[in-house]
Image: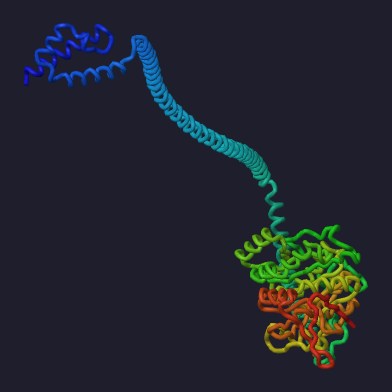
């Protein structure tokens, strides 16, 4: 086996040398004599294999490029190698640059951290400077205060020193005068004794006069008591003989009786609004209003122009009625403001809540806060109580005289009354020129209440069996032309505790104003309505007495949105639904 391998190797070596020498494929005839001898010595069996090998070598030779091609490939390889080298250099340079950028990034990050640290330090320093500045300002303020206190103290000290100096000088002067008097006292001792004797005589005389004065005072008191007894006896005689259980028919008789009973005298130097009404016995022009609302502006007052008649709404409220006032603000006052802001009704109007004073600081503070928040409070400097309603209503008239004199109508309404704004506007448009008139629910031949209660009045206060003709107090209109006459009448008539009886009855009678009586279903007010109001009730009145403003407000809105209807029975028995958009017509006799 080894010998065969050596023989094949020799044959291959000879063939390779021949190929390299000739540069072409070997042929049999080209094999030198040595080769032939070798073949002859035993290579015949390998001839086929050698021929196959020769063919393989020829194929391999065809795949080997020529010298020029190898040179070109070598050059190409060199160029490729050069490009690869350049690429390697570029990559190396890029890597170097990346390292440098990374170093720069780290350096920038370090610098950024240092800058952030410096910014934080600067911010802390700024805060410290602000605090120091504030401390310096506080020190300056404290210094100014201390300086001011020191100045005041210095001034007080100087004043004190001056006072002490003056006192010392005065003492020194008195000491000198005392010494002088003492020196002279020895000379004037007899004169002093004579003066003391005279003083004793005068003292005895004064004691006698004092005794006489005491006797005169006792006699005077007795005479006054006797006069008071006689006055009471006379009043009782007049009361029993002429007034008790009699009918009221003249306000002047009430005035004379009450003035005599109370011993009232005319107020000196009092301004009389209408002197023909008589002497002033009530001061109704000196009311003060510690909390107030702005006066009616001239631009808001129409002064009897049909295009835009005006009304002032005076809402009477008690000091502690915060909920009632808020309920009104959230119901019909919102409706009123909304309608006026849209200028749909063409009416210029103002309103205010009128209340008296309270003895409780907590309630007063809430009233002041309420006024600041809403700007609709007028507080009168008077005690707020039911028996003072007459005084409060007079104070409202005085406020209108001072702050809203050119308004067309005044609508007085209590805080437990709901106002139908649609009817309010219709009424004002229809009656703003009704001079010298009052509009309300009239009461005729109403009798005084003699049993204890809210409306009690004694026979001594009011001996008559009936009240004068008047309108119910919760809601009524008055034309502006009667404001001053009513106020003037209240100057001359002793007060009655019930404001509607006094103002719309007694004062109206003296002022000569007229009460308008409703001639139809619609009216200003009616106290005697059912607890549950019908749609027709809601439609027919301006003022509606209620226990819940929101319930009434919702019912009124339902009617004017046609969710509920007012159905009336005609004379022939047929049912008729009233058009909710049709304005209510107010007719009066």
12 or 490: nearer the viewer: 12
User: Would residue 78 be seen by someone viewing this image from the given angle?
Assistant: no
Residue 30 sits above or below residue 384 on the image: above
Image spot of residue 582 (x, y percent): 83, 76
Image spot of residue 28 (x, y percent): 21, 12
Image spot of residue 552 (x, y percent): 69, 77
Horizontally, residue 453 falls left or right of residue 107, namely right
Horizontally, residue 186 falls left or right of residue 523, namely left
188 or 135: nearer the viewer: 135
Q: Residue at x 86, y 70 (%)?
A: 429
Q: Residue at x 91, y 65 (%)?
A: 305
Question: In the figure, residue 573 lies in which quadrant?
Answer: bottom right
User: Would residue 130 be seen by someone viewing this image from the given angle?
Assistant: yes
Residue 159 sits above or below residue 565 on the image: above
Q: Residue at x 41, y 22 (%)?
A: 101
Residue 130 sits above or below residue 415 on the image: above
Question: In the figure, residue 254 lies in which quadrant?
Answer: bottom right
Image spot of residue 490 (x, y percent): 83, 73
Going by the picture, which residue comes out furthest to the right? 276
227 or 528: nearer the viewer: 528
**Image quarter of the C terminus:** bottom right
Q: How is the image coloured?
A: rainbow
345 or 275: nearer the viewer: 345
Question: In the figure, residue 332 lies in which quadrant?
Answer: bottom right
**Image quarter of the N terminus:** top left
């Amino acid at each position: 086996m080894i010998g065969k391998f050596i023989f094949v190797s020799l044959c291959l070596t000879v063939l390779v040398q021949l190929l390299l020498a000739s540069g072409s494929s070997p042929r049999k005839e080209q094999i030198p004599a040595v080769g032939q001898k070798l073949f002859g010595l035993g290579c015949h069996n390998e001839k086929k294999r050698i021929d196959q090998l020769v063919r393989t070598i020829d194929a391999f030779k065809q795949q080997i490029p020529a010298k020029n091609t190898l040179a070109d490939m070598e050059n190409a390889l060199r160029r490729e190698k050069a490009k690869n080298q350049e690429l390697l250099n570029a990559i190396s340079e890029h890597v170097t640059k990346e390292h440098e950028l990374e170093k720069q990034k780290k350096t920038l990050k370090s610098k950024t951290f240092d800058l952030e640290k410096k910014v934080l330090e600067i911010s802390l320093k700024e805060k410290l400077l602000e605090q120091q500045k504030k401390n310096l300002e506080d020190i300056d303020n404290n210094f100014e205060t201390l300086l001011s206190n020191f100045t005041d103290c210095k001034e007080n000290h100087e004043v004190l020193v001056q006072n002490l100096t003056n006192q010392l000088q005065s003492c020194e002067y008195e000491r000198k005068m005392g010494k002088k008097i003492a020196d002279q006292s020895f000379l004037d001792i007899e004169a002093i004794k004579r003066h003391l004797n005279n003083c004793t005589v005068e003292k005895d005389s004064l004691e006698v006069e004092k005794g006489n004065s005491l006797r005169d005072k006792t006699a005077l008191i007795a005479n006054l008591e006797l006069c008071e007894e006689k006055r009471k006896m006379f009043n009782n005689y007049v009361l029993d003989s002429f007034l008790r259980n009699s009918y009221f028919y003249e306000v002047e008789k009430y005035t004379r009786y009450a003035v005599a009973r109370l011993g009232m005298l005319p107020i000196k130097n009092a301004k009389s609004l209408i002197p023909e009404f008589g002497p002033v016995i009530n001061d109704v022009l000196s009311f003060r209003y510690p909390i107030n609302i702005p006066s009616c502006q001239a631009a808001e007052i129409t002064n009897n122009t049909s295009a835009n008649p005006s009304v002032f709404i005076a809402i009477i409220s008690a000091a502690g009625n915060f909920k009632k006032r808020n309920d009104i603000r959230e119901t019909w006052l919102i409706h009123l403001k909304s309608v006026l802001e849209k200028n749909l009704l063409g009416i210029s109007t103002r309103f205010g809540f009128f209340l008296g004073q309270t003895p409780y600081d907590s309630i007063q503070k809430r009233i002041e806060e309420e006024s600041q928040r809403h700007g609709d409070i007028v507080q009168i400097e008077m005690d707020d109580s039911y028996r003072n309603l007459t005084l409060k209503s007079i104070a409202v008239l005085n406020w209108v005289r001072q702050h809203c004199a050119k308004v067309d109508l005044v609508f007085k309404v209590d805080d437990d009354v709901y106002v139908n704004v649609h009817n309010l506007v219709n009424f004002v448009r229809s009656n703003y020129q009704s001079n010298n008139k009052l509009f309300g629910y009239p009461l005729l031949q109403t009798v005084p209440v003699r049993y204890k209660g809210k409306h009690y009045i004694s026979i001594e206060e009011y001996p008559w069996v009936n009240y004068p003709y008047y309108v119910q107090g919760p809601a009524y209109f008055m034309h502006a032309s009667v404001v001053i006459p009513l106020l003037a009448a209240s100057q001359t008539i002793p007060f009655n505790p019930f404001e509607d009886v006094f103002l719309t009855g007694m004062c109206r009678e003296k002022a000569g104003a007229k009460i308008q009586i409703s001639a139809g279903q619609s009216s200003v007010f009616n106290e005697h309505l059912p607890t549950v109001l019908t749609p027709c009730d809601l439609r027919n009145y301006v003022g509606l007495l209620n226990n819940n403003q929101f319930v009434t407000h919702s019912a009124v809105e339902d009617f004017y949105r046609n969710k509920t209807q007012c159905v009336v029975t005609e004379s022939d028995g047929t049912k008729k639904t009233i058009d909710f958009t049709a304005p209510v017509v107010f007719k009066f006799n």
